[in-house]
């Protein structure tokens, strides 16, 4: 990862401050960050990566991303846990909501959201708890729930490999995907998509 450019152009999270996202997720760190509360959250994520606190960086990014982009990032993590080109019904439903967040696609998430132990069903619960303009009732979960579920999906993917070197490589892949999505990309990095990348989800 080219760290010089990795944290620039994160347009999807550029309006969010570090303090706002930390308060949203009630996040605590094992050190006192130099990034101030009013600084962009991207600066804090970069600082966490520099301190080798990858899990904290992934959590902050999951909380900072807009809901659709976050759920898409989680769907990519869920794919890591399946056979190539395989998709569960829950994953299909979650991805359908990402690309067309309507009452119809949201309703399709409900049954999976009630039993969310795996990354694919977690993304259904995340999408189901994102408020839509025409909701008749507000979501019952707290505002930071979708972000925490997205982070949980990243964790499941991170710990899926068996070898330490593979786990480290997976962590960098997850971060790279998230940063690409934050720039408006689709998270399909060159090393996993034959060198082709595409437009984002929104």
Image (tube, rainbow, N blue to C red):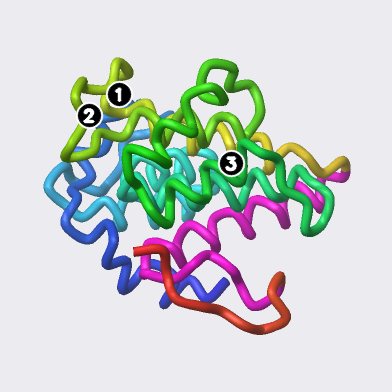
Instruction: Determine which residue is flagged by label 3.
Output: 154
Determine whether the residue tagged by mark 2 lies in a helix, strand or loop: helix
Task: Assess whether residue 52 is covered by the magenta stretch.
Answer: no
Residue 147 image point, x, y percent: 39, 35
Tag of residue 23: 2
**Badge 2 density bin: few <14, some 14–19, many ≥20, Cα 10 Å:** few
Residue at 46% across, 67% down = 180
Question: Do the CB atoms of the residues marked 2 and 1 lie less than 8 Å apart?
Answer: yes
Q: Looking at this view, name the residue that lies furthest to the right.
A: 163
Determine whether the residue tagged by mark 3 lies in a helix, strand or loop: helix
The image quadrant where one finds the C terminus is bottom left
The Cα atoms of the two marked residues, 3 and 1, are separated by: 19 Å
Q: Main secondary structure of the magenta part?
A: helix
The Cα atoms of the two marked residues, 3 and 2, are separated by: 21 Å
Instruction: Note whether 177 is above or below 166 in the view shown.
Output: below
Instruction: Determine which residue is flagged by label 1.
Output: 26
Image side of residue 159 versus residue 61, left or right: right
Observer-side mark, 3 or 2, equals 3
Residue at 26% across, 27% down = 143
Instruction: Note whether 137 is above or below 63 in the view shown.
Output: above
Q: Which residues are magenta?
A: 163-191
Judge by depth and name the residue closer to the eye, 70 or 107: 107
Image side of residue 171 versus residue 105, left or right: right
**Badge 3 density bin: few <14, some 14–19, many ≥20, Cα 10 Å:** many
Instruction: Note whether 103 is above or below 178 in the view shown.
Output: above
Residue at 67% across, 35% down = 156
User: In terms of image quadrants, where is residue 88?
Assistant: top right
């Amino acid at each position: 990862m080219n760290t010089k450019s990795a944290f620039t152009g994160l347009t999807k999270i550029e309006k969010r401050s570090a303090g706002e996202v930390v308060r949203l997720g009630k996040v605590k760190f094992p050190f006192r960050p130099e990034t101030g509360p009013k600084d962009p959250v991207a600066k804090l994520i970069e600082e966490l990566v520099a301190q080798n606190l990858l899990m904290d960086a992934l959590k902050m990014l999951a909380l900072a991303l807009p809901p659709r982009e976050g759920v898409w990032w989680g769907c990519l993590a869920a794919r890591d846990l399946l056979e190539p080109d395989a998709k569960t019904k829950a994953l299909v439903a979650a991805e359908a909501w990402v690309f067309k967040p309507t009452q119809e696609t949201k309703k399709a998430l409900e049954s999976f959201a009630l039993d969310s132990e795996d990354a694919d069903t977690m993304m259904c619960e995340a999408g189901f708890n994102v408020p839509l303009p025409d909701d008749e009732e507000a979501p019952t979960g707290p505002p930071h729930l979708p972000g925490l579920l997205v982070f949980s999906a990243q964790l499941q993917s991170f710990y899926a490999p068996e070898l330490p070197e593979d786990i480290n490589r997976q962590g960098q892949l997850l971060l790279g995907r998230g940063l690409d999505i934050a720039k408006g990309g689709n998270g399909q990095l060159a090393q996993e998509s034959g060198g082709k990348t595409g437009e984002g989800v929104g």
